[in-house]
Image (spheres, rainbow, N blue to C red):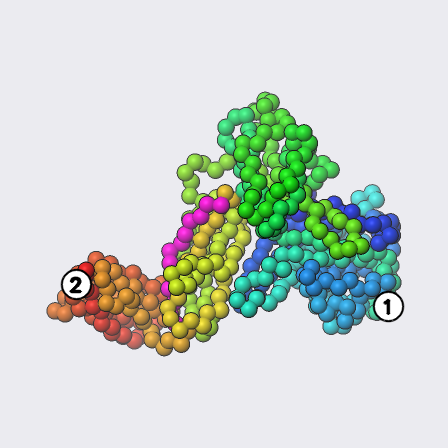
Amino acid sequence: MKRILLSCALFFVLGLASNLYAQSCYVGTPNISNVSIYSQGDSCYAKFDLSFTMKLNSGNKYIGIDFWQSVNYVRPEYSKVPTAKELQNSLGSISIDNDKNVSSITPNTVYPFATGVRILRSGSITKTVTADSVNYFIPGIIVAVKKSTDGTCPVSLLSIRADVYSTNSGNGGANNQIQCVNGITFSLGNPTISSALRNCTKPRTLDFKIETSSLTNITVSYKIYKDVGTGTPTFDPNVDQNVTINNEVTVTNLSSTNPIVGDKVSFTGADGNYSLDENAKYWVVVYYTPPVAPGEQPLTYSVSRLINNTCMAEGALPVHFKSVSATRKGEKVTIKWETATETNNRGFNVQRNDKGVWKNIAFAFSQANDGNSSSALAYQFTDLNTSKALSQYRVQQVDMDGKASYSRICTVNAEVSTRSVIVYPNPSADGKVNLLFEDNSERNVIISDMSGRIVKQYKSITNNELSVSLLQSGMYTIQITNLAKATITTEKLVVKKQ
C-alpha cells in the first residue's frame, strides 16, 4: 500500500504456462497505473507506470522489458537476449542493471546487449526487497507512435504487449542466456470505468459506469473492495477487503452501445455504523480476459478506480476554464487551455468545426487526481491544419458521468494568409463582428463611424481574437495599433441589420 497510484490502475493476474519461465525468476502481479494519452506534433504518446514482482534470486543480474503495439508483435527467440533485428518493430525497451544492492536504480540509457535498440524514457526505478521477492516500480514510461493519415492517434496505441525477461550475466553484450520470460498483453483504455462516485446519502451507496470500445459483447466481472491501510491508497487484492455482495458480479453483454451502469450499488457493511466508516475509500475493480493468439494461455487483468470518501456538491460546475486559445504557425495550429478547478472531470475533446459539424480530433485525459483539482492545470494540442479558410476550434469537457460542457470558440487564420487582421463576418447582419489577429501581441483597437466619432475602443488587447457587438447599421473604420511592432492597420466594416 506504499506505491503512488492514481485513480485509474490496471492490475494483472498472470495465467501463463509454467514452461515459459523458471520458477527461480517468476514474474508476478504486474501492475499498470497513472495512464495518460496525449499528442504533440505528428506523434501520439502513451505514458504509464509499471510495477512487477520477481522471486528473490541473486541470479537476476539484468532485467529487460520489451514493448510492442500488439498488432506489430513478433515474438523473439528468447533463448538468448533479443537482437536489434528482432526488436526493430518494437516500441522500445527498458533495461535494468539489477546487480546492485540499492533501493533506487537509474535505467540504462543504452541497450546493453546490442546497438541500435530504442531505449524508452522513464523515471528512476524503485526496488523494494521483501523476504522472498523483489518489487520494481518504474514511473513515467513513455511510448510513441506516428499519427494516422487523418491526423488522429491510432487506436492500436492502446493495446500493448510487454515481455519481461532476466539474465544471470552481469555483463552486457550479445548471446547472454535468458533465465525466464513472461509476456503481458494489456489495454490502456478498454474496458474503462468512466464514472465512480459516492452518494452523499446514508447508508452509503456507490454509483459507477463501466464502458468498452468493443462493438460486440464481451464478458467482464466486477468487485467492490474497501481500501485497507494508511497513506496514499493503492489497490492490492491481497490486502484490500472484498465487500461485494455475493463476492462478484458477472456481466456477459458489455459493449460500446450497452455500458454497465451501477446506480446506488450497496455492499457488505454499507448498512452498518456509518460513523465508524466515515473516512473509508472503495475500489471498483473490473476484470477482463481478452482473446489471445493460438497456443497462448489467457491472462486476466483488471481496471481499478478509486472512490474517495467525498462527494461532489449538487449543482457544482465540473470545470472552470481559466483560458483557451488557438494560434497558427505555418501548417500547425496549437490549442492551449488552462483550468482553474476541475471536479469529477474525465478529460477533454479537442474539436474542430468542419463545414458546420464539430468533430473530435484529439482527447486529453484530465491531469487531476481522480478528476478533481483546485489548482490551475495547463493542456495543449497541436493540430496539422492546411485549410485555406478560417478554422474554428473549441474544447469539450467530459465529466465522469458522460456529461459535457464547452469552452469558448477560437478562430485561426488560413494557412496561406498574410493578412495581419481579418474582420468577419463583413458585412455583418446583426451588429456583431469578430477581429482575428495574426498573433497575441498587445494591441489597441478603435472603431469609428463615417463622421469620425469613436463608437468602440479597446486598449491593451493580448488575445488573438476580439468580439464586438451592438453596432448599428452603417459603415465603420477599424484602426488596429500593434504596440509591440509600432504598426497601424486600418480595415473597413459594413453593418446591414436585417
Q: Are marks 1 and 2 in contact (CB under 8 Å)?
A: no
Residue nearest the viewer, comparing 217 with 149: 217
Q: Which residue is at 52% across, 26% downward?
A: 202
Horizontal side, residue 127 vs residue 403: left or right: right
Q: Which residue is at 79% across, 69% downward?
A: 83
- The residue carrying mark 1 is 175
Residue 20 drawn above or below residue 41: above
Q: Give residue 317's quadrant in the image.
A: top left
Horizontal side, residue 184 vs residue 278: left or right: right
Residue nearest the viewer, comparing 300 with 56: 300
**Disc 2 crowd, CA 10 A, few/some/many (<14, 14-19, 20+):** some
- The residue carrying mark 2 is 473
Residue nearest the viewer, comparing 336 with 184: 184
Residue 148 is situated, as x and y percent measured from the top left of the image, at 57, 66
Residue 309 is situated, as x and y percent measured from the top left of the image, at 55, 34
- Quadrant of the image for the N terminus? top right
> Label 2's element?
loop
Residue 342 is situated, as x and y percent measured from the top left of the image, at 47, 47
Q: Which residue is at 69% across, 49% downward?
A: 290
Q: Is residue 413 magenta?
A: yes
First to last magenta residue range:
402-414
Q: Which residue is at 80% across, 44% downward?
A: 130
